[in-house]
Image (spheres, grey):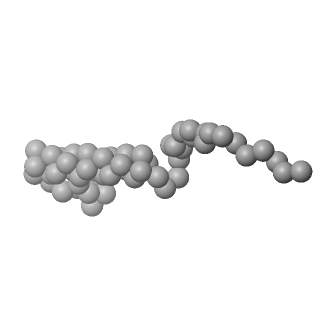
Amino acid sequence: MTKPQPTTTPQLEETKFGFNDYAERLNGRAAMIGFILTLAIEYFTDQGLLNWLGLQ
């Protein structure tokens, strides 16, 4: 006796965790925003980021 095969493939939602397109895109956007903010801080304060944070 053979088992019946499913007739349709389930539509699974892509996970939001781990190495997937969504996570990589979000990480890239966050990195771009951080880089632009670092440039803006250095431009407007005439100090490097470490000086501005008081770490140097």
Q: Is residue 9 left or right of residue 6?
A: left
Question: Residue 6 at what x, y percent from top left?
Answer: 70, 42
Q: Is residue 13 left or right of residue 27?
A: right
Question: Residue 43 at what x, y percent from top left?
Answer: 10, 49
Number of marks drawn:
0
The residue shown at (22%, 46%) is: 37
State whether residue 45 appears in this view: no
Q: Is residue 31 left or right of residue 3?
A: left
Question: Which one is nearer the viewer's eye here, 49 or 29?
Answer: 29
Question: Which one is nearer the viewer's eye here, 4 or 13?
Answer: 4
State whether residue 8 appears in this view: yes
Question: Residue 8 at what x, y percent from top left?
Answer: 62, 39
In the picture as drawn, the residue positioned furthest to the right comes out as: 1
Question: Which one is nearer the viewer's eye here, 24 or 7?
Answer: 7
The residue shown at (60%, 42%) is: 9
Q: Is residue 5 left or right of residue 39?
A: right
Image quarter in which the C terminus is found = bottom left
The residue shown at (53%, 47%) is: 17
In the picture as drawn, the residue positioned furthest to the bottom comes out as: 56
In the picture as drawn, the residue positioned furthest to the front comes out as: 1
The residue shown at (26%, 57%) is: 50
Question: Residue 14 at what x, y percent from top left?
Answer: 52, 43
Question: Which one is nearer the viewer's eye here, 53 or 31?
Answer: 31
